[in-house]
Amino acid sequence: MCRSIRTLFNFEPPVTEDEIRAASLQFVRKVTGFNKPSKVNEVAFLKAVDEITGISERLLRSLQTGAPPKDREEEAAKAHERAAHRFSM
């Protein structure tokens, strides 16, 4: 999985549209291998980002869980700690 794509489900505060779009953009970049598409491919690239954003929004709205929402700051701190440990070796 692309390291820039983060889990978006079951967080407090809830995920924003911008976060969903950013994850969709990273997904399309990973699948295509393009960081920035050429002019010829730009329309198809942006259309894919838009479609995946919409699909992801619908998916996140339809999911259910009994687990309590995760705290964004707490999860970010855990990720930072894991990264510090991983890269300190």
Image (cartoon, grey):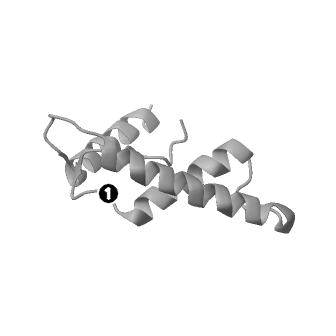
Considering every residue shown, the one lying at the far right of the view is 40
Residue drawn at (45%, 37%) of the image: 87
The residue under label 1 is: 15
Residue drawn at (86%, 64%) of the image: 40
Image x and y of residue 71, in percent: 19, 49
Above or below: residue 22 compared with residue 68: below
Could you tell whether 11 is left or right of 29 in the image? left
Above or below: residue 79 compared with residue 14: above
Could you tell whether 27 is left or right of 62 in the image? right
Is residue 8 visible to us here?
no
Foreground pick, 27 / 54: 54
Image x and y of residue 25, in percent: 58, 56
Quadrant occupied by the C terminus: top left
The secondary element bearing badge 1 is classed as: loop
* Residue 85, quarter of picture: top left
* Residue 50, quarter of picture: bottom right
Is residue 2 visible to us here?
yes
Foreground pick, 88 / 30: 30
Image x and y of residue 21, in percent: 49, 60
Q: What residue type is labelled 1?
A: Val
Foreground pick, 46 / 3: 46
Residue drawn at (42%, 37%) of the image: 88
Circle 1 Cα neighbour tier, 10 Å, few/some/many (<14 / 14–19 / ≥20): some
Residue drawn at (17%, 45%) of the image: 69
Could you tell whether 63 is left or right of 23 in the image? left
Image x and y of residue 52, in percent: 55, 51
